[in-house]
Image (cartoon, grey):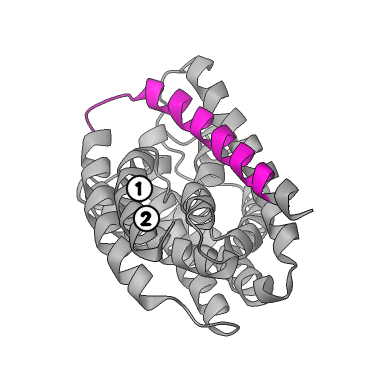
Amino acid sequence: MDMNSALLLAIFFSFLIAFIFSMFGQGGGSVYSPLLILLGYAVLISTSTSLVLNLITSISAGYVFYKNKMIDFKASFMFVPGIVLGAFVGGAISKYINTNVLLWLFVFFLIFLGGRMIYGYWEKVKAEEKRPKNLSMTSYVIIVIFSLGVGIVSGLLGVGGGILIVPFMTYLLKYPTKFAAGSSHLIISFSALAGILGHATSHQLDYPLIAATGVAVLIGGNLGARFSLRVKPMMIKLGLGLLMWALSAQLLLKLLGRL
């Protein structure tokens, strides 16, 4: 595939991914990176570009949640120190990690996330509770440790971490789903920015690719967030899970071809 065709496909799929994932409070980084790799872009270029796209999606979609008063700023900022440190470190050391190791991490990450999305399709939906007013010190310590780990994964693989943050907030911290999704966008914006800075310290970013896909993601993320406030797209969760498994299979074939 020539690079012009790859760029056009990257623009189209970036819009689609941003639209769909922003409905769940996620930036789509779990799909941006492997998609760009499969289109022929280098792993480091794919992960760093993915972080920029995550940042754009989160700001665009997060603004919609902010206008609808669905972001808990106090809880969100508890995640920031750990996720910023972890994402910067992950981005900075990614250059020194063997490419095949990163691809294997993508394979396992996509298998796990795909399973999580598919499980969510059959999961019983509980009645939404009110968001907690205060969190205990134990919860804060768990948040710091969790956010540090998510940050490192985010920086290394170019993923925003929303697909981990949202269930963490809903199941462990007992936040309503839409508040978790809105707060997740704010948290992801910090992790993505820190990861980008980490990558910028170790290698050159692909600015033409970032500019082209960035516009698509800006539009898709905003539209997806607006759409999420009116529908319950459970079928899309199932489709996304299967898509992640398909991408993991493609990456696995790419890896086996390298061995």
Position of the N terminus, as image quadrant, is: bottom left
Of residues 110 and 171, the one nearer the viewer is: 110
Q: What residue type is labelled 2?
A: Ala
Rendering quarter of residue 94: bottom right
**Vertical arrangement, residue 130 with respect to residue 168, above or below:** above
Residue where numbered disc 2 is placed: 10
Percent x, y of residue 150: 62, 55
Rendering quarter of residue 193: bottom left
Residue at x 63%, y 77% (from the top left corner): 92
Q: Is residue 247 visible?
A: yes
The answer to the question of whether label 1 and label 2 lie on touching residues, with beta carbons closer than 8 A, is yes
Looking at this view, name the residue that lies furthest to the right.
259
Mark 2: secondary structure: helix
Q: Give the range drawn in magenta.
A: 229-254
**Vertical arrangement, residue 167 with respect to residue 123, above or below:** below
Residue where numbered disc 1 is placed: 13
Query: In this rendering, would 32 be left or right of 82?
Result: left
Q: How crowded is mark 2: few (under 14 residues within 10 Å), some or many (20 or more)?
A: many
Q: How many labels does the image show?
A: 2
Q: Is the magenta stretch mostly helix, strand or loop?
A: helix
Query: In this rendering, would 112 be left or right of 239?
Result: right
Of residues 118 and 102, the one nearer the viewer is: 102
Looking at this view, name the residue that lies furthest to the front.
2
Residue at x 63%, y 47% (from the top left corner): 139
Q: How crowded is mark 1: few (under 14 residues within 10 Å), some or many (20 or more)?
A: many
Percent x, y of residue 25: 39, 44
